[in-house]
Structures are given as structure tokens and as C-alpha cells.
Image: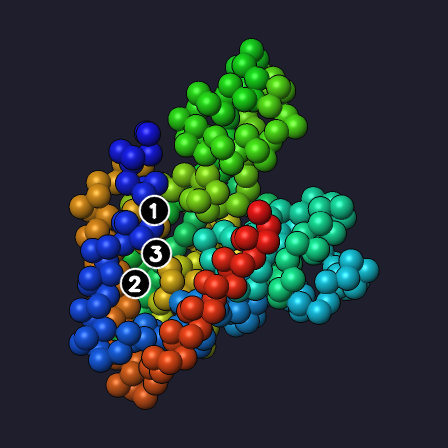
Amino acid sequence: MKKLFKWEFWPSWLFYLPVYALYLWYSLRARTLMFFSASNPGMYMGGFVDYSKYDILKKIPQNVVPKTILIEENDHQLKSVKLHLDQKEIDFPFILKPDRGERGYAVEKIDNEAELEIYLKKFRTRLVIQEYASEKLEFGVLYYRMPDEQKGNISSVVQKVMPHVIGDGVSNLDSLLKTTERTSYYYTELSKAYAHRLNEIPEKDQELILSEIGNHCRGATFYNCNHLINERLIETFDNLSKQIDGFYFGRYDVKTDSEEDLYNGIFKIVELNGANSEPAHIYDPQMPLFKAYGFMFRHWKTIFRISVKNHKKGVPYMSMKEGISTTRNHFKRKKLEVKTLS
């Protein structure tokens, strides 16, 4: 019931209703529903759906990307995957996720060989193995640059804080999950994940991190950090983004040890999303709904402007037939995978 009064937990289709109307208006102006496909010529479909995370990461300067391996769908044998890990010198723990996916779907931290074997049997698709980035802070930085301009900008910075509880030396984990405000919203999911530890009593002041995947739908809290936007930060991401062929718009998910390191470009990029990016700072628990819509409307205006400018420079829009077919098949495949897992 508490979620009904917090719009950050509304179903995405409900929140997006006004945004859909704006999207249709821009589609009429561009004369195609697929206008966003021209936003990033270097990403399939502009980075909306069905693009390869691995291919995008390979375009980024490798000094800011964790070691990464692509596992083809016909190469899921445990022995073969372990060989890839040895060759790349990646040890446990590491991150394993589908090469094509969004919103934290099937992203898992793998701590040992048994967990690896279980995951490989569950997901028969192209996978990405990524060295675990141990930096303690995680940010999402939404960057954009107009195709006819040399200087870009940053429209959103969000800090992602993982779901956690603090022990009092008396309450068991089950009680802490229920009484801690943020974890109470995800009690069903977290109690299932920690079913074997619900009776455990954490020590006083002990912090127990319940997930290391920085996604809102996985329990992470998103905090508005737009106050961090300044010329230093813009210059850092400008210099980085100009090295990525065909990239004009998207959100960097980075891990770093301090805000100063973020400014200085000392971080690891765990993912770069394209046209499917959101100004994730809007999910801050204190963000008013009308302000969130204001950010979303400006967000889609930016995508539209970049796409139209790229199109005038010769970048084609994806055909309606291919775009609709790709999107339908993407969600059909995801629905089938979810059904299989359940």
C-alpha cells in the first residue's frame, strides 16, 4: 500500500503515459516512430533495444572498462567458460549478464564455480562476463552532445545506493527487512533471496549489503546528484565520449571511489546505454512527480533534436518494419525467458 503513494514504484507503463504522448508528437514531426534510432549511429537502433553491450564496451577506451568476455550462446560449457576466464585472468567474483538486456535483468554477481554452472544452465543466450569493479561508489551520468557542436553536456547524475540493513544486535534479518523503510518495499524479493538467513541476527551497527546490482528494480535507492554537474565533469565525459564512434547520447554507469575521482576520470565504466537511457535522478525518493515529468520531457526533446540533426547529416532512420519487429521479438524473447525461469 505504501508504494501506491510513491510514484517511483508505479508500473513504468503508468508513469510513462504522458511521455508516450510526447513521443508520438515527436514521431509525427519526424514522420517515423523510429526517429530515436538515429540518435547514436554507432549503436544498433540507437541503443534502444537489442543492441550488444559487449560491442559498445569495446568501443570505449579500455583503460576505463573492466576486463570483459563475450560468451556465445553455443559456448556455455563450464570447462570452456573457465578457459576463457583463465585466458583473460578474471577471478571470482565477477559479474555475469545477458549481452542484450536492460533494467538489471538477469545481472548477477557470481562468487564461485557452483553459481557459475547454475547460471550457464539457466540462460541460453549470449552472455557478458565482466571483472568485478570493487570501487565503493556507483553513479549514472547521462551525457549528450549535438552532432554539429564540439562541446557536450550532462543532464543527469544519479548515485545508486545498494539495499542494505544495519544490525542492532537484537533483531533478526527478517525483522530488519520489514522495519527498514527501503528494504520493506522489496521485502518479498529480498526475503526470498535470503530465505536461508532470515533468522540470522546481525551484530550492532553491522551493515549488511543485500544486493550489489545498482538497479532500482533490484532495490537500489537512486539519489539526485545533479549538484555535481560542473565544467570539470562535463569536460571529463566530453573527452571520453568523443573517442566513442557514433555516440551522442546515453548514460554511463560508472563505479569510483570518490567524487573527486569521478571528476578526474578515475573510474570503471560497467555499462553504457543509448536511447533507452533515462535521467535516473528522477527516481530520487524526494523528487516531486511534476518535476520528474519536466526532466523526462526535456530528455526526449534532446533525443529528438540529436536524431533529427543526425538524419539531416545522412544517418538513416531504421525502417518501421524492422523497428517494430525487433522490439516485438526482444520483449517476446524476454517474456519467454522469465516464464522459463519461474
Residue found 71% across the figure and 69% down from its top? 74
Above or below 191: residue 150:
below
Question: In the figure, is residue 142 to the left or right of 178?
Answer: left
> To which residue does mark 1 refer?
11
Question: In the figure, is residue 198 to the left or right of 11?
Answer: right
Labels 2 and 3 touching (C-beta < 8 A):
no
> To which residue does mark 3 refer?
278
Pick whichever, 148 or 29, lies toward us. Answer: 29
* Circle nearer the viewer, 1 or 2: 1
Residue 153: numbered disc:
2
Image coordinates for residue 332, horizontal then vertical, percent: 48, 63
Question: In the figure, is residue 288 to the left or right of 56?
Answer: left
Image coordinates for residue 89, horizontal then vertical, percent: 74, 58
Question: Disc 1 to disc 2, how far (Cα)?
Answer: 30 Å
Question: Which of the marked residues, 1 or 3, is nearer the chain's N terminus?
Answer: 1
Q: Is residue 205 visible?
A: no
Residue found 46% across the figure and 23% down from its top? 178
Helix, strand or loop at label 1? It is: loop
In which image quadrant can residue 70 be found? bottom right
Question: Disc 2 to disc 3, how far (Cα)?
Answer: 15 Å
